[in-house]
Image (cartoon, coloured by chain):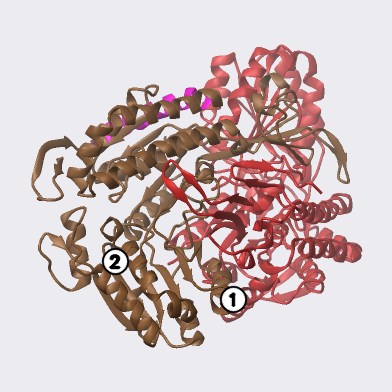
Chain colours: A brown, B red
Amino acid sequence: MSITSIDARTGEPRGASYDETSAAEVAATCAAAAAAAPGWAALSRADRAGALEDVAAALEARSAEIIATADAETALGEPRLTGELARTCFQLRFFAEVVREGSYLEATIDHADTSPMGPRPDLRRMLVPVGPVAVFGASNFPLAFSVPGGDTASALAAGCPVVVKAHEAHPATSVLCFEAMRAVLPDGVISLVLGRAAGAALVRDPHVRAVGFTGSTRGGRALADLAAARPEPIPFYGELGSVNAFVVTPAAAAVRAEEIGRGLADSFTLGAGQFCTKPGLALVPAGADGDGLRDAVTTAAEGRTFTMLTDGIRHAYETAAGRADTRAVTPTIVEVEAGELTPELLEEVFGPYLVIARYDGAADLDAAIDALPGALTATVHGEDDDRLGADLARSLPNRVGRVVWNGYPTGVSVGWAQHHGGPWPGTNTLFTSVGATAVRRFQRPVAWQSAPASVLPEELRDDHDGIPRRVDGVLHLPTT
Amino acid sequence: MSITSIDARTGEPRGASYDETSAAEVAATCAAAAAAAPGWAALSRADRAGALEDVAAALEARSAEIIATADAETALGEPRLTGELARTCFQLRFFAEVVREGSYLEATIDHADTSPMGPRPDLRRMLVPVGPVAVFGASNFPLAFSVPGGDTASALAAGCPVVVKAHEAHPATSVLCFEAMRAVLPDGVISLVLGRAAGAALVRDPHVRAVGFTGSTRGGRALADLAAARPEPIPFYGELGSVNAFVVTPAAAAVRAEEIGRGLADSFTLGAGQFCTKPGLALVPAGADGDGLRDAVTTAAEGRTFTMLTDGIRHAYETAAGRADTRAVTPTIVEVEAGELTPELLEEVFGPYLVIARYDGAADLDAAIDALPGALTATVHGEDDDRLGADLARSLPNRVGRVVWNGYPTGVSVGWAQHHGGPWPGTNTLFTSVGATAVRRFQRPVAWQSAPASVLPEELRDDHDGIPRRVDGVLHLPTT
């Protein structure tokens, strides 16, 4: 069996195809990753940070070829893919910064002491790499959430070798990125497998210690179940489907209907609506202001056309939209009353698809919000001194991972304070796949009791002063 | 059906019995916990810390009754249970300190800025409580790992209501502790259910957001599978079975055989060998020094007798030991050559049971260590300038959660640097159930994007200065 690189705009093969990785090859790849794990884990923080920067530079050196290939395979367009490669390289360098800063180790020292419980031994704790990590590339971000993406970057930063399962939608892009990375990393630290069977074998492989996944709730759940059913279960970090609510208060609709409508149209159609943070459900007030907002969204979206990532995605979108477009699809806006929201309408539709639910008063809105499944984000558009808006901004954190005020949920910046995760089905864990703390998914704690300095990691020795540490209960910053 | 309080020393009913909680009662209990969740989560850190201290005081106020009841139900003895209650109350006060210190919130602020990716919105992240937590009491610690134990204390500290499933081995102790706690906590913040069916219902209840469990690998795995199979999967934190390796180098055996042997005898029989950190496998060198160590363990353990927690535990121990003792059991020491270690010999036996495996040289030892399953701890006894000991202390962190140097693994002190967890089957997650970071199991991240100060938690407002925070990438300590 082989995987063929397809031109997303024409549906025609591009002339490159790749053998699916056999079960034996997956096993050998994972064994090689396990063999590479101790060396990669033992690298100093400075050296690992440098290696992440080398990866960024290696990708940039082949940017023209990578962007052209990704554009052919995804039809996302050169500007978007140029931005996505920049994001990918920024992210690698950001994780290098996280590694150098060193807080991610959570280095903690309790010197021997007496306590109300009697004498207490010297204890020192820090986080160590879990070992080889499997990463599943996503269809919708051929770079930033695929071979060189956030899961890979954070696992490498944590000190773990990575085996990526390439997404079928962009095999040539995956191979290209993999080759650029492999050239600057030690043997076995980055590997690539292709094919769905290889992906399942990866999740079951005894050398694999954790899995990072970005994709559909259904696909993610199936793999999560595999991970949980292993003889030794391993963590599965799934960033899954999400219906991101976008709530406009009457006060906001009264003064910004046109502006919000245009912004919403841009956001729900961004990347052809193939973003996990796409605002899929707008809760808009009944009445003239809400009508105006709806009209503004509709007008702004009208006439736009998009090429979907794959034929399969296009087909699923057209089924949900209830029509068959030509190869280029057009946006779909479904309008209902808030009381008419069914569970089906609260399922993610991948593509430029928006449900506008009109609510009549706060009670109607509350009832609709109570019925929402967990999600990655929720957005509130409100005004200053807008009681309803403030109430929403305070209550929505109970249901989602990120609350956006007077903005748009698409666009997930990479930084220290980012959180990209949320209650099921947004994700299946309490972690983020974007931002500094994404590394925590691939680390486990170890405590050393009464150990001589010679056997401790350098960050846990008394004389180390390069990173923030908690010593005898008190957090200390490095003095240098 | 009802659960009867049994005198562990006589096997006779103590005269108290308790109805098993029905499915409808479990559902109502979890709904009440969910109703209590917002109020408990919204409490200020100072008030929640105060409430934890009130719980400690309430338990101390009834200490005589609690200790006497626990002693009758477990036969662990008054000195041990007095210490265990002290530990339990110390732990509650320690988590109050963790809450006041505030680092556990991971408060992080990135002000709006430009980045290589273009303008970046204001983002603020912190951890919030997950919601109601189910806790399974353990047989072997009727206080410190049961109703008022570490899982409960850390979940309450994180801001989560707790529903405890009492262990069948000590229902009267559980009810007593629960009543003491309920009297000082808001309605619904602490609840108790009884019976195995109630425990399973708890794991499946839609209001429950996480589970803490201490017990056998088999029981834990069954519940973990239930948690993973829910329509909305939830995290299951299982502290499971563990064979804790105890390695003595030839250099250490040459000079401390007698001392190490006596210490090992005390450690593997502590609490009748019913500790999850019991050293269950001693790797001892072949030859005269190792013989001396084996003789010292055997002599020290000989003649000791123990009452097991329950008839079931006694029966399982006697089956493993291959004999039937009278009501009081005696220690079992099995000696094999390291090459003879089978998977059966590497399974935890609950009770005063020790396998001594004799190794002949470093290669023999390495082979034995390579075959070890994951565990909570490993211990090395070595000498200064003992190359083998240092190598072991450096490599064993790959396999366990805590490495003990020249000490004994039983005794898990509560503190900032403690880690009580480890690779499967030690636990099924990357978390600890003891120490400051135990709270992290019951928190999830939320990010606020461009939110006005009025809707932010106080710890994320610019003017807050009470806790360590990361602002624009730099960790800051409070100035007050």
The segment highlighted magenta reads A22-43
Magenta region includes residue A36: yes
Residue A226 seen anywhere in this rendered image of the structure: yes
In the rendered structure, which amino acid carries the disc numbered 1? Asp
- For mark 1, give the secondary structure: loop
Q: Quadrant of residue B181?
A: bottom right
Residue A312 shown left or right of residue A257 in the figure = left
Nearer mark to the viewer, of 2 and 1: 1
Q: Is residue B402 rendered to the left or right of residue A6? A: right
Residue A188, image quadrant: top left
Q: Secondary structure at mark 2?
A: loop
Residue identifier under label 2: A349
Q: Is residue B435 or residue B220 the one in the foreground?
A: B435
Asked if marks 2 and 1 touch (Cβ < 8 Å), the reply is: no
**Image location (x, y in percent) of residue B199:** 59, 67
Mark 2 residue type: Val
- Give above or below for B311 relative to B369: below
Provide the chain ID for the residue under circle 2. A
User: Callout 2 environment at 10 Å: few (<14), some (14 to 19), or many (20+)?
Assistant: many
Q: Nearer the viewer, residue B231 or A270?
A: A270
Q: Which residue is mark 1?
A: A385
Residue found 67% across the figure and 18% down from its top: B389
User: In this orientation, does residue A228 appear?
Assistant: no
The residue positioned 66% from the left and 18% from the top of the image is B390
In-image side of B329 versus A135 (left or right)? right
Where residue A138 appears, x then y in whole percent?
A: 31, 48
Q: Residues within 10 Å of mark 1 (few under 14, many from 20)?
A: few
Q: Nearer the viewer, residue A214 or B52?
A: A214
